[in-house]
C-alpha cells in the first residue's frame, strides 16, 4: 500500500472513535482526544499488520537546535509506521498548528519519510471552525500533508474531516 492508502485506512479507524460523553456541558480533556486518536492509529496498524513506533527519535542539525531553542540535537515525532511497500510514515498529532511540529515533519520528509500532520479540534454547538491552507497559516512550504479533524459534540457524535492534499 502507498502511504496515502495507509493514511486513509487510519482515518477510517479514527472516524469510529467514540470519545464518550461529549456535549455542550461536558468536554473531555485534550489528552483524552489525543489518546483516543493514538490508540485508533495503533489498532489500525495492528489490523493492517504494520509495525510502528511511538515517540520515534530523530536527529537534526545545529541550525534547527538554535532556531527552536532545543537543548539537544534530537526530537521525537508521535508515531512512525514502517511501510513494507514504500516510504516509512511519520505522523504528528496536535490540537493546534505548531511550528515545531511542522518543522519536525519537514525534517523527517528530508530523511525520506512521508510526513502527515493530524490536527484535531473540539467543536461545541455555536462554534465555527475554519481551516486554511498551510501557506495561509504561516508555513513557508507545502511539504507536509495536513489532515484536520473536528470532533463535534451532538447526539449523533458526528465528526468531520478535511484533508489538505498536496502534490509534491
Image: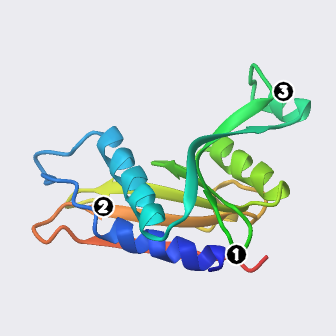
**Which residue was labeled with disc 3?**
66
Q: Residue shown at 44%/62% (left/top)? A: 46
- The residue at 68%/69% (across/down) is 84
Q: Residue at x 67, y 41 (%)?
A: 100
Q: Indicate the quadrant containing the N terminus: top left, top right, bottom left or bottom right.
A: bottom right
Q: Is mark 1 on a helix, strand or loop?
A: loop
Q: Position of residue 152 (x, y in %)?
A: 25, 63
The residues bearing labels 3 and 2 have C-alpha atoms spaced at a distance of 36 Å
Q: Residue furthest right?
A: 62
Q: Can you identify the residue that label 2 sits on?
A: 151
Above or below, comparing residue 6 to residue 97 in the picture: below
Residue at numbered disc 1: 85
Image coords of residue 139 (percent x, y): 72, 55
Which corner quadrant of the image does residue 83 belong to?
A: bottom right
Earlier along the polypeptide chain: callout 1 or callout 3? 3
Query: N-terminal of the two: label 2 or label 1?
Result: 1
Disc 3 element:
helix
Q: Residues within 10 Å of mark 2 (few under 14, many from 20)?
A: many
Amino acid at each position: 500500500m502507498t502511504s496515502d492508502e495507509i493514511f486513509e485506512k487510519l482515518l477510517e479507524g479514527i472516524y469510529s472513535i467514540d470519545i464518550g460523553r461529549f456535549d455542550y456541558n461536558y468536554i473531555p480533556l485534550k489528552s483524552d482526544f489525543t489518546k483516543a486518536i493514538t490508540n485508533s492509529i495503533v489498532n489500525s496498524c495492528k489490523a493492517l499488520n504494520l509495525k510502528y513506533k511511538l515517540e520515534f527519535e530523530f536527529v537534526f542539525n545545529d541550525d534547527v537546535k538554535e532556531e527552536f531553542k532545543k537543548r539537544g540535537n534530537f526530537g521525537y515525532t508521535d508515531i512512525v509506521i514502517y511501510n513494507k511497500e514504500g516510504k516509512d510514515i511519520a505522523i504528528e498529532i496536535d490540537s493546534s498548528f505548531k511550528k515545531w511540529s511542522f518543522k519536525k515533519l519537514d525534517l523527517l520528509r528530508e530523511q525520506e519519510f512521508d510526513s502527515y500532520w493530524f490536527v484535531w479540534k473540539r467543536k461545541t454547538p455555536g462554534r465555527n471552525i475554519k481551516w486554511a491552507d498551510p501557506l495561509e497559516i504561516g508555513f513557508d512550504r507545502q511539504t507536509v500533508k495536513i489532515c484536520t479533524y473536528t470532533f463535534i459534540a451532538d447526539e449523533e457524535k458526528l465528526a468531520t474531516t478535511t484533508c489538505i492534499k498536496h502534490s509534491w
